[in-house]
């Protein structure tokens, strides 16, 4: 059994943890939310890189055998440094613009992500490798993460904000929408209502967890035996994180020992 660290700026990475608990249930998970500092998406590249590295070092010091950087923003700004420093498998998350370009029929793809992700070199280098006939309508989801962190997932404020952010993508007649932030899958129902049934929504959680599974195999960490447990660590409030996890995770947690902690790191 492996100890797997899952890190995000806040509760967004729970969308990746949910998929991990589905596909790879028999491991020990440590979920680390830097909710005291969310959102990352409007901070500077160097701040995001330093803080993400600090959070991942903490996970290694606390026994993680593998880490999922379950945050597109942290992956964009810090994954190279994290991989260079840490000796364990590190899996990142990127907006699924490549599968979206392949799936799109009309060549118009919307990308909803944080400002930092959309401005990052990593994202723009990936974009440059894709066919030029595909048009990407990039939209920064300013304000969405703070509302989600606040538990306002179905609030009228969320609906108004989403409507504003999705307007340009709908007007451009995109037939595919990439959710380029791990917080956004929790808005799927809302987004679906606003964009209609015909637009394909691309979210990469499934692919990320399959990659985690392959890495565990390759590093001899795939053995699934032991006591399943989930530690929920938050730099804000551990109880709030646990309440959000119980609300947002679809995977039953009944066979798992769960505890939470508020951290000052
Ligand atoms: N969940 C994050 C992402 O995937 C970060 C959002 C934020 O903190 O701005 O980008």
Image (spheres, rainbow, N blue to C red):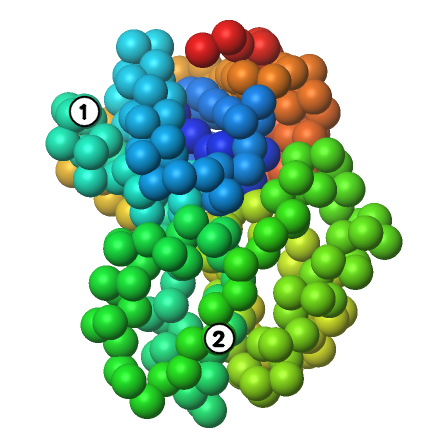
Q: Is mark 1 within 8 Å of ligand 1?
A: no
Q: What residue is rendered at 77% in x and 42% in y? A: 152
Q: What residue is rendered at 43% in x and 76% in y? A: 136
State the residue in front, 195 or 205: 195
Say whether residue 176 is left or right of residue 58. Answer: right
Across and down, in percent, residue 38 comes to 55, 32
Badge 2: how crowded within 10 Å, few (<14), some, or many (20+)?
Answer: some
Q: Which residue is mark 1?
A: 86
Q: What residue is rendered at 32% in x and 89% in y? A: 133
Q: Tell me, yes or no, if residue 108 can be seen here.
A: yes
Q: Secondary structure at mark 2?
A: strand
Please say if 261 is above or below 195: above
The residues bearing labels 2 and 1 have C-alpha atoms spaced at a distance of 35 Å
Total numbered circles: 2
State the residue in front, 43 or 129: 43
Q: Tell me, yes or no, if residue 216 can be seen here.
A: no
Q: Which residue is mark 2?
A: 137
Instruction: Give the mark nearest the N terminus, 2 or 1.
Output: 1
């Amino acid at each position: 059994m492996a100890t797997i660290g899952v890190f995000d700026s806040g509760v967004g990475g729970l969308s990746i943890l949910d998929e991990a608990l589905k596909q790879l249930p028999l491991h020990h998970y440590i979920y680390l939310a830097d909710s005291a500092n969310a959102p990352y998406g409007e901070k500077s590249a160097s701040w995001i890189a330093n803080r993400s590295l600090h959070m991942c070092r903490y996970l290694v010091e606390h026994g993680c055998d593998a880490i999922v950087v379950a945050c597109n923003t942290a992956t964009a700004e810090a994954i190279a440094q994290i991989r260079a420093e840490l000796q364990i498998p590190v899996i990142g998350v990127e907006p699924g613009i490549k599968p979206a370009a392949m799936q799109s029929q009309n060549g118009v793809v919307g990308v909803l992500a944080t400002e930092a992700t959309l401005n990052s070199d990593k994202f723009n280098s990936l974009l440059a490798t894709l066919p030029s006939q595909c048009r990407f309508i990039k939209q920064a989801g300013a304000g969405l993460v703070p509302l989600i962190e606040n538990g306002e997932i179905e609030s009228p404020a969320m609906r108004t904000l989403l409507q504003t952010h999705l307007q340009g993508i709908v007007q451009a007649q995109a037939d595919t929408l990439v959710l380029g932030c791990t917080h956004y899958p929790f808005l799927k129902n809302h987004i679906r209502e606003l964009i209609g049934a015909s637009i394909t929504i691309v979210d990469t959680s499934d692919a990320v967890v399959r990659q985690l599974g392959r890495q565990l195999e390759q590093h001899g960490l795939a053995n699934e035996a032991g006591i399943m447990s989930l530690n929920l660590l938050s730099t804000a409030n551990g109880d709030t994180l646990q309440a959000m996890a119980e609300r947002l995770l679809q995977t039953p947690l009944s066979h798992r020992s769960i505890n939470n902690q508020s951290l000052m790191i």
